[in-house]
Amino acid sequence: MTAADLLRRAAGKLRDTAAVTTFGTEGWAVDLKDSEVTTADGGMMIADTRELTDGRPDASYIALMHPPVALALADLLDRAADAITELEFLANTGRATEAHVAHLAGLLALRQIARAILREPEDGDRG
């Protein structure tokens, strides 16, 4: 599997997961009193972190990473995958400049994010 394939699979997982969640364009909010994550208008509870030791940091993190953030990250991963494909073509045909190679190296660092999203080990991808 190429690095671009890995990023595209992670983007797909983000989109698929976000598509089945409850959210509005305003995202999610935190009810600090009850350590709950709710829809931004407070109309529906998304998560209750009360059982955790001081659940507020967890609730704040969950609210921070609401579905529109996942969708934006998916778009970023797809654009990076497209750039990787193009830059690898340039490198493989001997037309890549030092700037291209440096940019490719930076984009390849996104594999770590993709693996974390997919919960996959480092092995199994190339590029």
Image (tube, helix red, strand yellow):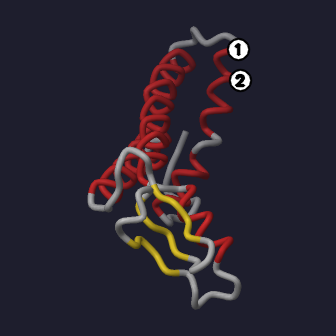
Quadrant assignment, res 104? top right
SS for callout 2: helix
Q: Is residue 5 left or right of residue 105?
A: left
Which amino acid is tagged 2?
Ala
Which amino acid is tagged 1?
Ala
Q: Position of residue 42 (x, y in %)?
A: 42, 64
Q: Is residue 37 left or right of residue 35?
A: left
Q: Which residue lies at the image location 58% right of the left edge and 51% below the top edge?
A: 113
Q: Residues within 10 Å of mark 1 (few under 14, many from 20)?
A: few
Identify whether 104 is placed above or below 47.
above
Q: Nearer the viewer, residue 10 or 90?
A: 10
Q: Residue furthest bottom?
A: 51
Identify whether 18 is placed above or below 85.
below
Identify whether 88 is placed above or below 61.
above
SS for callout 1: helix
| Residue 49, label in figure | none
Residue highlighted by disc 2: 102
Q: Nearer the viewer, residue 58 or 73?
A: 58
Residue highlighted by disc 1: 99
Q: Nearer the viewer, residue 8 or 3?
A: 8
Q: Position of residue 33 (x, y in %)?
A: 61, 77
Marks 2 and 1 close (CB-CB < 8 Å): yes
Q: Which residue lies at the image location 49% right of the left edge and 47% below the top edge?
A: 69
Q: Position of residue 111 (x, y in %)?
A: 57, 47
